Amino acid sequence: MATAKKAGKKTAAKKPAAKKSAAKKPAAKKSATKKAAAPKKAAAKKPAAPKKAAGTRKPNAAFMKEMRPSSELAAVVGTSPMPRTEVTKKIWDYIKKNKLQDGVNKRLINADDKLRAVFGGKNKVSMFEMTKLVSNHLK
């Protein structure tokens, strides 16, 4: 009788296993149909619009307006009227040429005599504060 119980357990264990494998087959069919449907959805998407070239962008008129530098600023960038962007470029050229950028903190600018007049007497100015101080010298 003990052998009959063991045999019954073995057969009982086999039946649920057979049911599990049978249950897996329909699930596999569903995933196969989903895979087949996925390419159709991808094909239905519209292609992305081409991006405009960077050279076609219009410049901001306020930045391109020529402004006359003050006498203090003219000692650094020159006396001719120029846009703000050009003034900033020339100041950075002057800073790099005279090695006025701080060695430890590159965001700071050590002012020499000419720049100290532009920066309102300050010896060190951050690059972000510099543009604010320079705008006071443009008319």
Image (spheres, rainbow, N blue to C red):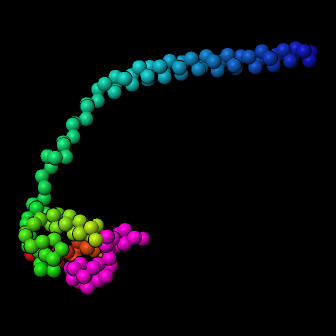
* Residue at 29% in and 30% down: 45
> Is 60 drawn above or below residue 123 in the view shown?
above
Q: For residue 58, say whether it is visible.
A: yes
Say whether residue 42 is left or right of residue 115: right
The location of residue 94, given as percent across then percent down, is 23, 69
Determine if the magenta segment contains residue 50: no
Q: Quadrant of the N terminus?
A: top right
Q: Residue furthest right?
A: 1
Total marks shown come to: 0
Q: Quadrant of the C terminus?
A: bottom left
Determine if the magenta segment contains residue 114: yes
Say which of 92 and 5 sits in front: 92
> Is 89 drawn above or below residue 11 in the view shown?
below
Say whether residue 73 is left or right of residue 37: left
Say which of 30 and 103 sits in front: 103
* Residue at 29% in and 83% down: 122
Q: Quadrant of residue 129?
A: bottom left
* Residue at 16% in and 71% down: 77
The location of residue 41, given as percent across then percent down, is 34, 26
Magenta highlight range: 99-124
The location of residue 30, given as percent across then percent down, is 48, 21
